[in-house]
Image (spheres, coloured by chain):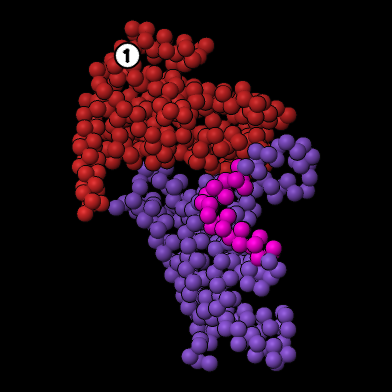
Amino acid sequence: MNIIKSMLAATVITASLSTGASAEVRLGLDSANYEPFYSRGSDGEWTGWEIEIGDAICAAMKEDCSWVPIAWDGIIPALTAKKIDAIFGSMSITDERKKTINFSDKYYNTPAALVAPKGMSIESVDDLKGKKIGVQVSTTHSNYVEKYLSDGTEVKIYSDFNEHNQDLFAGRVDAIVADSLALAPFLESAEGSCCEVKMELNDEAVFGIGVGAGIRKEDTELLAKVNAAIKQIREDGTYDEIAKKYFDFDIYGGSN
Amino acid sequence: MVWDWLPEYLPRFAEGLWITIKLFVLSLFFGFALAIPIGLVQVSGPKWLGLIARGFCTLFRGTPLLIQLWLLYYGLGSVVPYYPGLRESFIWPILVEAFPYAIVAFSLSVAAYEGHVMKGAFQSVPKGELEAGRAFGMKGFTLLRRVWFPRAMQNVLPTLAGEAVLTLKSVPLASTITIFGVYGVGSIVRQETYRTYEPLLFVGFIYVCITALVVVLFRWLESRVPSESQM
């Protein structure tokens, strides 16, 4: 009897929680750390540049926001299934994704980088023939490798960003393609000192114009609010103030 | 339900199916080959060997397979670079591949579960039958081969079938170390088409088919082994 009662109580609590949560804007991000954009400390709190920008955008929209970690390969389905209201986890704006969801204006843009051991000589993409390349699943980087490098190379797909770094260090892959900025902390670490950025990769068709917030197609009201908020924090200096704390270059990438 | 993506991905699913089956069959084979001695030494071996076998079973049945897999693959991967000569050595091409790690991890897990089952199976053969065998002059390996092992297998085939099916359904774990079997291909479809139900249902359907095949295969095996009542 007691068990049934407590189960009922739990159901009531979860029900009231979920109705309460719909009043706030739930921002989804990758459940794995993605430094320096976001990472979860031992206390369970999310910190990082993107968290601060997200909070600033919420403040500008005058909304209460919560952060919801979700496995990256399920994050777009989670958005369309209304488990979250916006994706705020360094998702690049691409035409492919636009078929399913809307994007806000970009809030940052960094180039992709090809990283390989220091001893390896890579002058151009052709030097990668016969090599193993690691990428994270469900990223523009994996799309790039699929499009340009899948001939003559072996592509290894990882579910987690940190895992392909580890395997690059271990020598199981010869090179990885990932975001240049996200790679910076790894390259500065003891393990990452094995390797360096060989080249920056640019291809607007694959990498898109930058990173924006992913929002459901029908949610045009939220889209307009987010765009206005991005514009506002860009203009009132909040954006630059936060960016200065993390980066010594223009993370916004251009003036548009 | 939208299925128009299916024809495009079928070749990749075929590749994935091959990887899944290869991993499943090989680990079942190596695992069972290990399980027989592991079960046997617990029943009749020297005491210390029996204790080691029991400890092995407890350890590997008591920890998640995912952890074992990662300890092997990423754990070893993080240590390997500190042995400079290793990269030039002849075993390096094997250490670089993920597949051998998966085979080792899955085989050890199968060995632990089935080793435990085999221990019970060997125990369940009545002493009188072994003594009868000895009375006919059979010794050691001959006794094992002609009486003990076949009698043990009779009792235990249905249990082994169950264990095999459970092993099959652990195979998706290998996708976390870059081995993209059926499940891995399903997750690629999910990320590229943004469809959730259809790819997952299709992956589930493939697994049901393989499971059915495994069950039929074990039934056939059971029918080949004469049961108690037929003797």
- The residue shown at (46%, 34%) is A32
Q: Quadrant of the C terminus of chain A?
A: top left
Residue A113: image location, x then y, percent: 57, 27
Residue B139: image location, x then y, percent: 73, 84
User: Extreme top residue here?
Assistant: A236
Q: Which residue is mark 1?
A: A231
Q: Main secondary structure of the magenta part?
A: helix
Host chain of mark 1: A
**What hue does chain A carry in this figure?**
red
Is any atom of residue A162 visible in this view?
Answer: yes
Question: Image quarter for residue B78?
Answer: top right
Question: Image quarter for residue A220?
Answer: top left
Residue A97: image location, x then y, percent: 37, 35
- The residue shown at (33%, 7%) is A236
Closer-to-camera residue (B148/B182):
B148
Q: Is residue A132 above or below residue B200?
A: above
Is any atom of residue B23 visible in this view?
Answer: no
- The residue shown at (38%, 44%) is B193
- The residue shown at (57%, 71%) is B118
Residue A233: image location, x then y, percent: 34, 12
Closer-to-camera residue (B79/A227):
B79
- The chain coloured purple is B
Q: Secondary structure beneath disc 1?
A: helix
Q: Which residues are magenta?
A: B48-74
The magenta stretch spans residue B59: yes
The residue type indicated by label 1 comes to: Lys
In this picture, residue B230 sits left or right of residue A219: right
Q: How many marks?
A: 1
